[in-house]
Amino acid sequence: MDAFYTAKSFSGKTKSGKVKIKNEGELAGQLRADGFVLTSFKELESEDGQAIKIKFLDRFSSIPVVERMMFAKNLSVMISSGLPLPRALQNITAQSANKKFIGIIQSVSEDIQTGTSFADSLAKFPGIFNELFINMIRVGEISGNLEEVLNILSMQLEKDHELLKKIKGALVYPGVILVAMGLVGIVMMVYVVPQITGVFKDLNATLPASTQFIIDTSSAMRDYWYIFLAFITGIVFGIKFLLTTDAGKKMLAIILTNIPVVKNIVIKVNCARFARIYSSLLKSGVSVVESLRIISKTLTNFYYKKAFIRAVSDVQKGINLSKIIKEEKKIFPILVSQMIEVGEETGKTEAVLGKLAEFYEEEIDQITKNLSSIIEPVLMLLIGSVVGFFAISILKPMYSVLENIK
């Protein structure tokens, strides 16, 4: 059977996790052999959550990170003040302005009142509460420190939100420029080029291949605009679908980790998220193996997922995480393995990882501030190349015509 447990060592260290076990006695014996005493035990009906009924649309529900962050923070304050969980959830529904989220919290509150655990109630909405959130809540429920776990979760979500906001903010400028350039290009091809084409036809000029290409493309865009629209829509949805497959995720990871400036950002973002999440999980009392398994499902980059899936297996064999990380030189700077090694030697891994996360978050902050100055020259070259190609293609035949007239 599958079970979730928490245990304490004689020195006071806490660990927890999900295990496959025949019975509670066998688990207690295994933990005793490792120097731990079983403090709580909860049998799970299914490892993959099949026993929990999840509605089809709830799998794709989405709520802003800020809403989830405030939910965890407010709930932590209310529970620490002595309010029972159902009452605290009802109070939160009165504070939230998001009708969709209010309905979800009310559903969770009703489930808890019928005897369902808080973690299992949240697990019905996988599109909103990921495995990291649910597992930390489960640990908090079993160990009795739910308010502390919720506080850690709110800080984790806040750091994630700040990280993503910085990256998105840095991409706004190039995004606006590219969209504007695309719109100007469409206007030129649909309205300006046809007028110039008429001049060339009247003069019966022999056109260069580049000019003929622009004219043919312009005619096609005007006459068969619906095919172009369908083509662009197909490309957008095709890329989105491709990125949901393993092959697409691997392809994206290969591209991102081979572009000089982008590679640096990708590595630092993933290292910051890994350090922050791992630190949060360890603080909450989740075992090393379970923490790595959760991280492998939380990080989206193909190479990092693959590295942590392998780490789960290797750590179970007794290999130190620092040694595993050290072998992944392509995606982990040497600093990461060195810091983890220090944490393993001193027994302060969670504190060391917190410092490491802060270090990389500051590095990302500096990179994103300077990103516009890095992107500007690339954009100028791109715009200059397009304008140059267009100008040469249009002006070259005009000069040829004028020379023939002379």
Image (spheres, rainbow, N blue to C red):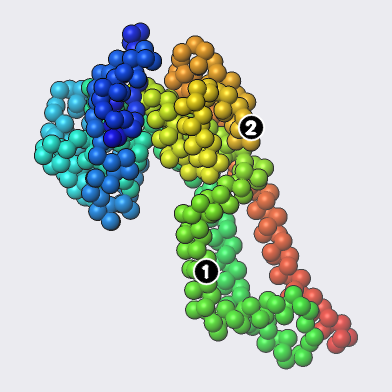
187 versus 37 height, above or below: below
- Mark 2: few, some, or many residues within 10 Å (few <14, many ≥20)? few
Q: Quadrant of residue 151?
A: top left
Kind of residue indicated by mark 1: Ile
In this orientation, which residue lies closer to the viewer: 178 or 106? Answer: 106
* One can see residue 222 in this view: yes
In this orientation, which residue lies closer to the viewer: 51 or 236? Answer: 51
> Is residue 119 rendered to the left or right of residue 283?
left
Element under disc 2:
loop
What x and y, as percent, mark residue 389?
Answer: 73, 67
* Disc with the residue nearer the chain's start (2 vs 1): 1
Which-is-in-front pick, marks 2 and 1? 2
Q: Residue at x 47, y 32 (%)?
A: 312
Kind of residue indicated by mark 2: Lys
Q: CA distance from mark 2 to mark 1?
A: 38 Å
Residue 263, label in figure:
none
- Mark 1: few, some, or many residues within 10 Å (few <14, many ≥20)? few
Where's the N terminus, which quadrant?
top left
175 versus 95 height, above or below: below
> Is residue 288 rendered to the left or right of residue 172?
left
Kindly identify which residue carries mark 2: 329
